[in-house]
Image (cartoon, rainbow, N blue to C red):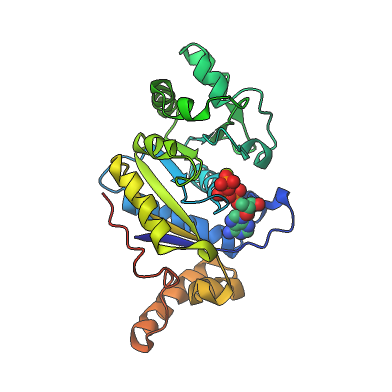
Amino acid sequence: MTLGTLPDARLESADQTLIMLKNPHSTDAEAFRVLRTNLLFASVDHKLSSLLITSPTPSEGKSFISSNLAVAFAQTGKRVILVDADLRKPTLHRVFGLVNNVGVTSALVSDTSVNAITGALQTTAIPELQVMTSGPLPPNPSELLSSQRMQDLLRQLQAHCDLVVIDSPPVVVVSDTAVLASHADGVLLAFSHDKLRRDIARNTIGALRQVNARILGAVLNRVEGNQHGYYYSYHKSYGNRYYSTHYSAQKQNKSKLTGAQSPSSSAPPWLSIHPA
Ligand SMILES: Nc1ncnc2c1ncn2[C@@H]1O[C@H](COP(=O)(O)OP(=O)(O)OP(=O)(O)O)[C@@H](O)[C@H]1O
Ligand SMILES: [Mg+2]
């Protein structure tokens, strides 16, 4: 199931990464709000206390998506903790302008007291959002990711907020990601549109299913202009939520008659993940 498509945001610089804050009225930010809503629909029968974002291969947009999605959920008033579980190539401290001398790794080796956990959390410009950066890079990231202590840490974090959003390494490169994914309530699979390959997607979904990870669906990232469908280009020209919502509904009705493309039409039919 495709839960969303995200356009290529054509960021002018790295400090534009948080488009939910920098450009909240843009079509790019609207795409994240659509994804947020669809994630809630996809997990309607299960409480979603922790959501892990992963992808088959590197650089498909996991950190970009998890950061903006965490902000999008926090903007609805949910208390969110965003966790950087990429212990090899962490980036969230840079995205949010935070220090990285404390974080996941320091919390894992500290005692399990509440103070030790909260001491590894950092506040952000959004009152409802806290970030646990990776912490100092460890020599044994695989061991840490798949440890019992990591599971316990996630559980402790869930007790501190409404939603834990976890940014993780790519599944094909870091096999322990699947184990970590199996401890989250839901998994969102990010696919970069230009890298989408059926065999790799299938292997990734298989690896996650093997450990009983609950895949909620996929998001197609970096979808270019007209491949992104009329829905977002319509938003672009009007930029007003009321008009775009109202008229996109009309257009959808019209599309039934004309065979015009639906919002997720850029997803190939074989990418139909049936939620576990
Ligand atoms: N939809 C998008 N529009 C514009 N820029 C994007 C988009 N998605 C990702 N990027 C940019 O592409 C780069 C790679 O994205 P990101 O770091 O999120 O990938 P990743 O999957 O986390 O990579 P890694 O596997 O190395 O952790 C970043 O500079 C990010 O800002
Ligand atoms: Mg990343």
Q: Horizontal and vertical percent for residue 34?
A: 46, 59
Q: Position of residue 57 (x, y in %)?
A: 51, 51
| Camera sees residue 177 | yes
Q: Is residue 1 left or right of residue 16?
A: left
**Residue occupying the point 63% across, 61% down:** 9
Foreground residue among 119 and 175: 175
**Residue 225 quadrant:** bottom right
Question: Which residue is more in the foreground, 31 or 90?
Answer: 90
Q: Is residue 20 left or right of residue 248?
A: right
Residue placed most toward the observer, 162 or 270: 270
Q: Which of the 4 image quadrants contains residue 153? A: top left
Where residue 165 appears, as percent x and y from the top left, is: 47, 39
Q: Is residue 147 above or below residue 231?
A: above
Q: Quadrant of the N terminus?
A: bottom left
Residue lying at the far bottom of the rendered structure: 258
Say whether residue 155 is left or right of residue 116: left
Tag count in the figure? 0
User: Looking at the picture, does residue 9 appear above or below residue 188?
Assistant: below
Measuring 26% from the left and 49% from the top, which residue is drawn there?
A: 276
Instruction: Provide residue 87's location: percent of width, then percent of height.
Output: 56, 32
Q: Quadrant of residue 185?
A: top left
Res 24 visible: no
Q: Is residue 19 above or below residue 239?
A: above
Residue at the extreme right: 13
- Examine the rendered structure and indicate whether residue 59 appears above or below residue 238: above
